[in-house]
Image (spheres, grey):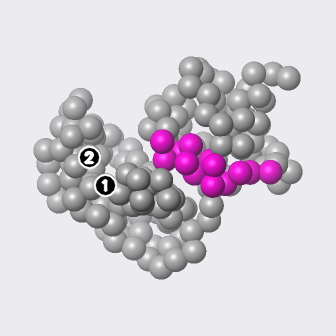
């Protein structure tokens, strides 16, 4: 079995493999997308993997379009209403129109990221957006809601509307 297939099969079971090159992730995700109808996704485990390691995976893959396809087929589906959500983003990513996938209904949580972790390289920016229910891929999981208290919704950032900057840090 090729390494990329092994990584793909681990990913669909919610097992994260840390020191994998971006090209292997891309090959693994391509494998998953080609076979998504026949694979048994452990969606809740993948969701936890995404909540804990999504930023690392995004940096490795460096292809938001591919990542969006993977998230659409592998995460638990959202079944709720339209939302108003916030995100604390890196200023340079916002300026490149590369806003992230993870949003929260709690402004204070987004402010924490905008002024903290996501402000280290270039400063941070607090964003507010309207998320039609079709833009929301998945609701917060138990880890995000109860342990981290971040209430992270995974969204398709290209489908969010009325994205506005509330504050720069």
**Apparent side of residue 166 relative to residue 79 in the rendered image (left or right):** left
Element at label 2? helix
Quick one: 133 or 42, which is closer to the camera? 42
* In the rendered image, the vertical position of residue 154 relative to residue 10, given as above or below: below
Q: Which residues are magenta?
A: 40-52
Magenta-colored stretch includes residue 46: yes
Which residue matches tag 1? 87
User: Which residue sits furthest front?
Assistant: 147
Residue that appears at 53% across and 45% down: 50
Name the quadrant containing residue 157.
bottom left
| Mark drawn on residue 169 | none
Give the residue number, with chain letter if any, for mark 2: 113
Q: Is residue 167 left or right of residue 1?
A: left
At numbered mark 1, what does the secondary structure look like: helix, strand or loop?
Answer: strand
Measured as percent of width and height from the top left, residue 9 is found at 76, 36
Residue 42 rendering spot, x and y as whole percentages: 71, 51
Real-space Cα separation, disc 1 to disc 2, in angstroms:
8 Å
Q: Quadrant of the C terminus?
A: top left
Residue 144's place in the image compared with 6, above or below, is below
The outermost residue toward the bottom is: 81
Q: Main secondary structure of the magenta part?
A: helix
Instruction: Give percent across and percent down for residue 98.
Output: 38, 44
Q: Are marks 1 and 2 in contact (CB under 8 Å)?
A: yes
Q: In the rendered view of the protein, which quadrant contains the N terminus?
A: top right
Question: Which of disc 2 and disc 1 is earlier in sequence?
Answer: 1
Q: Which residue is drawn at the image coordinates 50% and 59% (left, top)?
A: 142
């Amino acid at each position: 079995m090729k390494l990329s297939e092994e990584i793909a099969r681990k990913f669909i079971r919610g097992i994260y493999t840390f020191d994998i090159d971006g090209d292997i992730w891309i090959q693994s995700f391509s494998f998953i997308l080609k076979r998504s109808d026949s694979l048994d996704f452990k969606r809740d485990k993948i969701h936890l993997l995404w909540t804990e390691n999504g930023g690392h995976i995004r940096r490795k893959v460096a292809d938001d379009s591919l990542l969006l396809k993977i998230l659409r087929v592998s995460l638990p589906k959202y079944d709720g209403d339209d939302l108003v959500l916030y995100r604390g983003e890196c200023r340079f990513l916002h300026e490149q129109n590369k806003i992230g996938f993870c949003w929260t209904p709690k402004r204070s949580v987004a402010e924490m990221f905008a002024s903290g972790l996501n402000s280290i390289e270039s400063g941070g920016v607090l964003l507010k957006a309207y998320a039609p229910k079709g833009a929301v891929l998945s609701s917060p999981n138990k880890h995000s809601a109860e342990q981290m208290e971040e209430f992270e919704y995974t969204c398709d950032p290209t489908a969010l509307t009325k994205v506005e900057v509330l504050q720069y840090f």
